[in-house]
Image: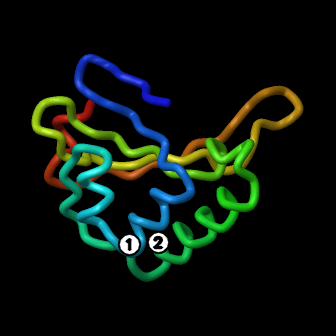
Amino acid sequence: MLLTTERLRIVPLTPRQLGLWLYDIPALGKELDCRYTAGSPHGDFRRIVEGQHALAAADPGNHLFHTFWFLILRDGGAVAGSACFKGAADADGRVEIGYGLEKPLKNRVT
């Protein structure tokens, strides 16, 4: 799956790609044709990514609700940030979304 806007490619990471994000960023960049310059997730954020990786791998049919979505600039291929659902939709179809943007690229995403 791939969503596109005028300025972005929005790519949900597969469970395998979540593993690459944690352990092999160069391979992930090559696979997604992007430049990720922030380094491996660390600290509390790493624990969140590891948890989402486990959830996505355990529930492949719903992995889109458990994964991170990379926000990749179409011009140059830099990863400008990521977003994720904070769980599946509720009974009314509502979801909560979390996101983060790379500081040097914040003004290029909006």
The quadrant of the rendering that contains the C terminus is: top left
Q: Which residue is drawn at 47% across and 75% down?
A: 46
Q: Residue at x 57, y 51 (%)?
A: 67
Residue type beneath disc 1: Pro
- For label 1, the crowd category at 10 Å Cα-Cα, with few meaning under 14, some 14 to 19 and many 20 or more, is some
Q: Do the residues labelled 2 and 1 touch (CB within 8 Å)?
A: yes
Under circle 1, the secondary element is loop
Tell me: 11 left or right of 51.
left
Where is 102 relative to 62, above or below?
below
Q: Name the residue under label 1.
A: 41
In this rendering, the count of numbered labels is 2
- For label 2, the crowd category at 10 Å Cα-Cα, with few meaning under 14, some 14 to 19 and many 20 or more, is few
Q: Residue at x 24, y 34 (%)?
A: 109
What number is the disc on residue 45? 2
Residue 101 horizontal/vertical position (percent): 31, 50
**Nearer to us: label 2 or label 1:** 1
Quadrant in the picture for residue 51: bottom right
Q: Residue furthest right?
A: 91
Q: Which residue lies furthest to the bottom in this view?
A: 43
Residue 12 horizontal/vertical position (percent): 48, 42
Where is 20 relative to 73, above or below?
below
Residue 106 horizontal/vertical position (percent): 22, 44
Residue 7 horizontal/vertical position (percent): 23, 24
Residue type beneath disc 2: Phe
Q: Nearer the viewer, residue 23 or 88?
A: 23
What number is the disc on residue 110? none
Tell me: 94 left or right of 97.
right
Q: Which of 74 and 99 is in front in this view?
A: 74
- Report how far apart the C-alphas of labels 2 and 1 lie in the structure: 6 Å
Q: Which residue is drawn at 74% across and 31% down?
A: 94
Under circle 2, the secondary element is helix
Q: Which residue lies furthest to the top in this view?
A: 6
